Amino acid sequence: MKEHELPTQAGITRKTLESLDRARSGLSEARDWLASDWRPLGTPLPSARGDAWRDAQRLISQAKALIDEAKATLSDAEQN
């Protein structure tokens, strides 16, 4: 690749932030699926599945927080 075809530092940061936004949106969608109703209505989750869903929701929340931290770090660096 020739130098004039390479992205700028600002361009790399922008694309990274866009990718992090997509990742965060995907995590939100996954969390929403775990919070959905299921068929047949009113049937309880088996204990192991319920535990796994709660654990997954917790981990998704942690991952979203890490993405937010990464985005803030990148944004702060762009301000300086």
Image (spheres, rainbow, N blue to C red):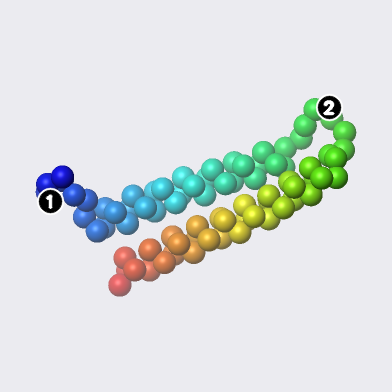
Q: Distance between the residues labelled 2 and 1?
A: 59 Å
Q: Residue at x 57, y 56 (%)?
A: 63
Relative horizontal placement of residue 65, taking residue 5 as reference (left or right): right
Image vertical order of residue 60 relative to residue 69, above or below = above
Task: Pinpoint residue 14: horizontal percent, then vertical percent.
Answer: 33, 53
Identify the amino acid type marked 2.
Answer: Pro
Q: Which of marks 2 and 1 is nearer the N terminus?
A: 1
Image vertical order of residue 44 relative to residue 9, above or below = above
Q: Is mark 2 on a helix, strand or loop?
A: loop
Residue at the disc numbered 1: 3
Identify the amino acid type marked 1.
Answer: Glu
Q: Which residue is drawn at 38% across and 63% down?
A: 74
Q: Residue at x 84, y 27 (%)?
A: 40
Hey, which quadrant is residue 46 in on the image?
A: top right
The residue most toward the top is 40
The residue most toward the bottom is 80
Q: Residue at x 56, y 55 (%)?
A: 64
Task: Pinpoint residue 18: horizontal percent, then vertical percent.
Answer: 39, 49
Locate the C terminus and report the quarter of the image it occupies.
Answer: bottom left
Task: Pinpoint residue 53: horizontal percent, then vertical percent.
Answer: 73, 46
Residue at the disc numbered 2: 40
